Image (cartoon, rainbow, N blue to C red):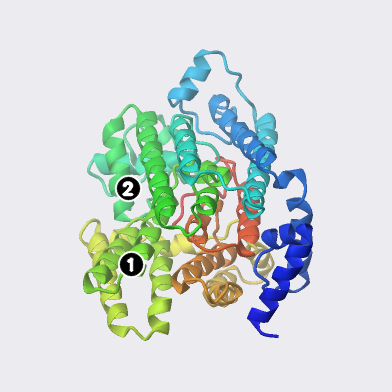
Amino acid sequence: MTRGTAARAQDVAMAQDPHEAQAAKLAEPPIPGGRVEAMMGVLIRVLAFSPLGRPLPAVSLSALGFGLVAFTGLCATAPGASAATLPVLLPLTALARRLGAPVLYPDVTNVIMYAGITLCCLGLAGMLWANSGGWSPDPRRVFWSAAAVVAVVVNITPVGTSDPASYATYGRIAALGHNPYLYTAADLPGGSHNPYTALVDPRWRSTPSVYGPVATWMHLAAALVGGGSRPWLAIWVLMIITGIAFLAAGYLLLRTAANPVRAGLIWAANPLLIYLLVMGAQLDTFIALAGITAILISRRDATVWHDLAVGVVIGVACGIKVNAVFVGLGIAVPLIRERAWARLLRTGAVAAVVTSGLYFFSYGTTALRALPAASSRVISQSFWRLFQMVGDQLDPAATSTLIGVLWPPLLLAVAWYLYNRLSRDVPAVLAATCALTFAWVLMAPWTLAWYTALAWVTLALLPRNSLTRWLTLVTGVLALAHFNAGHPDNHPTP
């Protein structure tokens, strides 16, 4: 039976049975995945036909989950009182404090955070199921509702990570004329009594920056606003520019997606991403914005100027964090398939020149010194930790080397598997970028929930597929495993 004949037969069956029609709407493209995928499919269908798959319960769960997380940021602000928030008072947190908001202590905070993150995941899944079942809110209303939430969120103390304190401190180091790739928080005048140093976890005060020069310039701008005595103001500036970048990416998706409602739910109105990216002021937000910009430019036309623009955007993104290289690899895949060697050479050459120029003409090779050590770390939620624990009983040095050798080819193998799970009808550049970044999150020895940003922003432009469920699950699990700002694994890494 041909695809056309099968499709017509399915249409007849749907016309005869409305329940079958609804199931077909909720079903994702048939992709071979074995028993695990089949079992997940059964569970999805059960949940999708439950109240969770209706618009009102789904939106309510999203709002409740995110509200719990935001409540943590409003209340858990006393130094040492909570491990999930920084001890700084941003405007709304300061207001809540003056109005007598309670201070949450670790055990209570943990319960609230676990419940909030879980509800965010369920709410997101429910909204997507409701959309698959026919719910189609005005995409502009979805975007502006998300914009209103972000406008509030940037005024709440960062939740779930201590990275913003490190960002502000690197900016302060640069503002004093020092090299943040050599000079550390512990070296600032006053040591642990310095307002910036005091916010950085003691275990990471002797660690230099591992981010690119473009990121350092953003940190510098924020620190210049904060000055020497107001690190909270520097962190607030970082929150605001991160929120702007998040909404800018959402606006691009709104304007370009074939299904703007789905794109809006996956990115702009995604409570999990607002928590991870905006409330954490994460640099991965800017990588996602640069990545989707480069992809859209590459798809727009094949002129020399478009190729040059793509190369520049990729180079700037790599100047923020080195993992932006996956954007370049994703864009290279369709060019290689089409044997567009001239375009590939132009884009790659410009990206290489811009990247190397940003690094070597700003802070020189010192900007790269910390990367080898950072890339060799293994975080607790990575499956490599078990491998490391066993290997360290025999030869720790050999184990570390073996991990470094094994994970890149395994990443490519998993990316190839994920890439082939997507329909051949979808744009190769989106499929390749999504697959590469998702595989990186799964296979890298050091992985954090916000590293999924680039996978999410590309997934938003793809039609419904089974990777959505797995990306939601992986992001949620990583978020649950790592929202503790004082956790020994919570260290700024590229």
What residue is pinned by disc 2? 183
Q: Secondary structure at mark 2?
A: loop
Q: Which mark is residue 266?
A: none
Task: Measure the alpha-carbon separation of dots 2 and 1.
Answer: 43 Å
Q: Residue at x 33, y 67 (%)?
A: 300
Q: Whole-percent x and y of residue 71? A: 59, 28
The relative height of residue 437 versus residue 146 in the rendered view (above or below) is below
The relative height of residue 193 versus residue 467 in the rendered view (above or below) is above
Q: Is residue 338 visible?
A: yes
Quarter of the image for the N terminus: give it. Answer: bottom right
User: Callout 2: few (<14), some (14-19), or many (20+) C-alpha neighbours within 10 Å?
Assistant: some
Place residue 360 in its image quadrant. bottom left
What residue is pinned by disc 1? 300
Q: Amino acid at mark 2?
A: Tyr
Q: Residue at x 79, y 61 (%)?
A: 17
Which of these two is toward me, 196 or 62? 62
Q: Residue at x 41, y 72 (%)?
A: 329
